[in-house]
Image: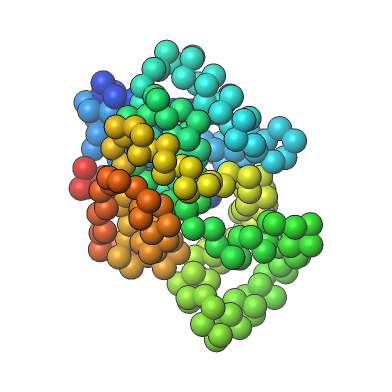
Amino acid sequence: MLPVFKLSDGPVPLLAFHGIGQDHRVFEPLARALEGRYAVYAFDLFFHGAQPVAIPDGVLTKQTYAHFIRAFLHKHQIERFALIGYSMGGRFALATAEAFPEQTDELILLAPDGITVSPWYKLATGSGLGRWLFRYFLKHMPLFHRLGQFLISLRLINRSVLRFAETTLATAEQRELVYNAWIGFRHLRFNLQKLSGLFNQRFMRIRFFAGHFDQVLPVSLLNPLTRRLQSYELTVLKTGHNRLIEKVARLL
């Protein structure tokens, strides 16, 4: 069972999934804002939190993940719920909605990962060679920095993306976490045609929040899914990637 923390009380259970390098505490401001309306259940995802849970066999499948969520719903006697996912947590919110569409009433995605898959992510996780190179660069951060500067000079990445990556990879513990998460979550990917068809069949409220200045997961990366949806709401806030949860908490 994944560690889960109930941060607020309300009539609607809201399952919350954080970004990479974070834990359930990132949703505490949001939970305070939603007190009385939502019962926020914030998860510590695999490899994260004070008591990290490893993935069986090292790679998370959708079937294994659905088993975890089914056990959580049974334990807490939850039949219907809402979902919120930030950044990497967007993959988990989408996977939950895909596995339990009849029970999902609302899907809230904050600069979600998993809709448009980065070519760098594909390169780093899609093959044995790519995973070896990914591990090698994480063990040689000066080389990682020089590669990043070279890619900036070719305009293949933005400077703020490199800055975000180096902040996320600042310590050996962080680098190990990122490697495990990138490799371990690589099977959480979606057929957007099928996913949108599933969502369009349901009376599911879908809300997207994005940061106008976000270069890590910009609003344009939502397009492959939103163009297939019959109904959704999009709010673009004047913020970057890191402060999006805080801004959404104030808005809600």
Q: What residue is shown at x 46% (from left), y 19% (from top)? A: 73
Quarter of the image for residue 11 reads top left
Is residue 53 or residue 95 the one in the foreground?
95
The answer to whether any part of residue 28 appears in the image is no
Q: What residue is shown at x 50% (from left), y 31% (from top)? A: 99
Q: What residue is shown at x 51% (from left), y 82% (from top)? A: 155
Here the colouring is rainbow
Tally of numbered tags? 0
Is residue 241 or residue 73 the one in the foreground?
73
Is residue 37 or residue 103 the one in the foreground?
103
Residue 216 image offset from top left, x and y in percent: 45, 64
Residue 152 image offset from top left, x and y in percent: 54, 81
Residue 67 image offset from top left, x and y in percent: 59, 24
Is residue 213 or residue 65 the one in the foreground?
65
Q: What residue is shown at x 67% (from left), y 50% (from top)? A: 183
Apparent side of residue 161 relative to residue 136 in the rendered image (left or right): left
Apparent side of residue 173 relative to residue 204 in the rendered image (left or right): right
The answer to whether any part of residue 47 appears in the image is yes
Residue 193 image offset from top left, x and y in percent: 47, 47
Q: Eyeballing the image, is 160 above or below 181? A: below
In the rendered image, the quadrant that contains the N terminus is top right
Quarter of the image for residue 200 reads top left
Q: Eyeballing the image, is 215 above or below 200? A: below
